[in-house]
Image: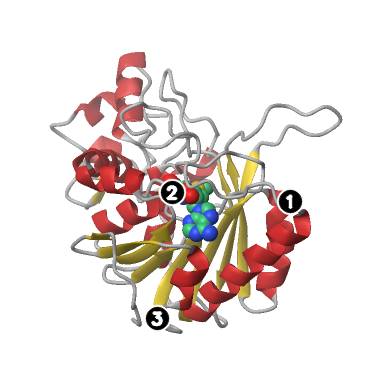
Amino acid sequence: MMMTMIPILETPHGRLFQADCLDFLGSLDSESVDLAFADPPFNLGKEYSSKIDDNRSREAYLYWCVRWLDEMVRSLKPGGALFLWNLPMWNLQLGAHLASKLTFRHWVAVDLKYSLPIKNRLYPSHYSLLYFVKGEKPAVFHPDRTPVPCCRHCGGELRDYGGYKDKMNPEGVSLSDVWTDISPVRHAKYKKRRANALPLKLMDRIVSMASDEGSLVLDPFGGSGTTYVAAELTRRQWVGCELECSAILDRFDRIDLDREHLADIQEDKNTLFTDADLERRVRAGLPLSPKYKLKSKDGRCTCPSMTSSSSLELFTSDV
Ligand SMILES: C[S@@+](CC[C@H](N)C(=O)[O-])C[C@H]1O[C@@H](n2cnc3c(N)ncnc32)[C@H](O)[C@@H]1O
């Protein structure tokens, strides 16, 4: 990688530069990045500690976005993935531009309320996550599987899988292009930086889907460093920039908090039922159908009625 700048942070896997995104991106080698992600300011007139102008004309904002997007496209390897997080109104325009250079894969609707209800409009309830690849096919694509959605009180399934229970993958449900299981960063312990820090679960999902250990992940809008933390903790290489880096430096000083959080996140993916939901069922006396095949902790598949010496026995029924 052609890097004449001096990093403000170097970790075992990554490098952060305190720099403007256009200067930083211009210094990257072409076709060097496996996964590029961007969560830019949305031009909503917000105040950032980096004092950027977040209130440009529509044309000026789109022109600026196209400039750094083109640099990200240049830096992508063939088969590399580009994800763009923004409001639907901007991603509509930016997606059309990207589609002239890359192959469109998905518009993922991430159900996170981002505004108050607006008169004469529908309540804005999703962010847009655009997913493109360079060339025809992604070099890496292994989406997480998610647990069966269950009631937060009794652990019962929210949908009826009818006669398909025995056909369901013990690793969980296939990921769709509507994500309803991402919660905003609320807990004081994990909230590193005002309202714009993305949830670690979101970044872990993106990083896991489109990169492997050792891949290079790029994010030119560091913010509080969620992308970098997700990459670091899953042994990807990463590189990025931010105008005001103190929140990221602080976060990496206390990365063990994120390590614990990520362990919890990873425990609850690629499994058909989370332990928390199974425990809720025990408390509610709600047996799990023995038709489901479950993955045991040692990775083997089993069905509830075959499981001995665990509380799963309590769930077995002849339903
Ligand atoms: C929406 S936030 C990113 C949040 C991040 N994804 C996270 O999870 O913490 C956008 C960030 O871009 C930074 N930024 C804005 N303009 C920039 C520029 N020209 N170059 C580099 N960073 C910039 C802002 O300081 C802000 O922290």
Q: Quadrant of the N terminus?
A: bottom left
Q: Residue at x 48, y 77 (%)?
A: 26
**Label 3, label 2: how many angstroms apart (C-alpha)?**
23 Å
- Helix, strand or loop status at disc 1: helix
* Occupied quadrant, residue 227: bottom left
Residue linked to disc 3: 32
Is the C-beta of the residue carrying label 3 under 8 Å from the nearest atom of ligand 1? no
**Residue contact between numbered discs 3 and 2, judged by CB atoms under 8 Å:** no
Amino acid of disc 2: Gly
User: Label 2: how many residues lie within 10 Å, few (<14), some (14-19) or many (20+)?
Assistant: many
> Hey, which residue is sitting farthest front in the picture?
51
Q: Quadrant of the C terminus?
A: top left
Task: Note whether residue 129 is visible.
Answer: yes
Is the C-beta of the residue carrying label 2 under 8 Å from the nearest atom of ligand 1? yes
User: Label 1: how many residues lie within 10 Å, few (<14), some (14-19) or many (20+)?
Assistant: few
Q: Earlier in the sequence, mark 3 or mark 2?
A: 3
Q: Residue 150 or 294: which is nearer the viewer?
A: 150
Please state if 203 lies on the left or on the right of 104 as rendered: left
Above-or-below relation of 153 to 34? above
Please state if 59 lies on the left or on the right of 101 as rendered: right
Amino acid of disc 3: Ser
**Residue contact between numbered discs 1 and 2, judged by CB atoms under 8 Å:** no
Residue linked to disc 1: 89
* Occupied quadrant, residue 62: bottom right
Residue linked to disc 2: 223
Amino acid of disc 1: Met
Q: Which of the numbered marks, if any, corresponds to residue 164?
A: none
> What is the x, y in percent for residue 3?
34, 78
**Residue contact between numbered discs 3 and 1, judged by CB atoms under 8 Å:** no
Mark whose residue sits in front, 3 or 2:
2
